[in-house]
Image (cartoon, rainbow, N blue to C red):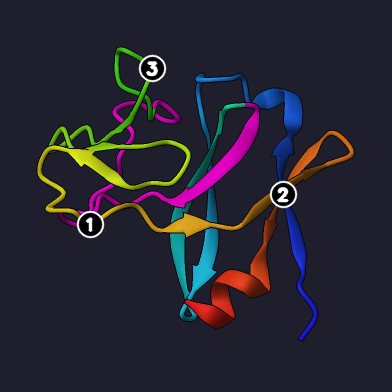
Amino acid sequence: MAERERLICAADELVELGKGVRFDMERYGQPQPAFVVRFQGQPRGFLNQCGHVPVELDWQPGEFFDDSRLYLICSTHGALYHPASGHCVGGRCAGRGLIPVPVVERDGRVYLIETAMTETT
């Protein structure tokens, strides 16, 4: 089946190590919160759900980075995740990372690749 893309935001809304953009997506037929941030020049998308317990990460809407701006942090548990991969790097995530969401940047916009997430995960 062909992949479908859905617009998330304009690319210039994502500043390197800055505020993320929240959006909703469908997974297993259910709506789920997700987000995208810019890290190392690339948009990085994840479900907005801590690996420890299913709570949203951001401490304020769109604020996903810790004070050092090196890691994504769960505002509830303090678990730290690497922004390139979502892998757990510390805290109460017990080795469980964030679930990546396929995104692509093209022509000044960031898109969610819908079928890759909804059909294979």
Percent x, y of residue 82: 36, 37
- The answer to whether 38 is drawn above or below residue 109 in the figure is above
Q: Residues within 10 Å of mark 1 (few under 14, many from 20)?
A: some
From the image, tell me which residue sits under label 3.
69
Residue 40 x, y percent position in the rendering? 58, 27
Residue of label 2? 104
Which badge, 1 or 2, comes first in the chain's sequence? 1
Q: Earlier in the sequence, mark 2 or mark 3?
A: 3
**Image mark for residue 96:** 1
Q: Amino acid at mark 3?
A: Arg
Quick check: 44 left or right of 47?
A: right
Q: Residue at x 66, y 74 (%)?
A: 115
Residue extending furthest toward the bottom: 1
When asked about the image quadrant of residue 68, the answer is top left
Q: Position of residue 26 (x, y in %)?
A: 53, 69
**Which residues lie in the magenta part?**
41-63
Residue drawn at x 22%, y 32% as measured from the top left: 75
- Asked whether the beta carbons under mark 3 and mark 1 sit within 8 Å of each other, the answer is no
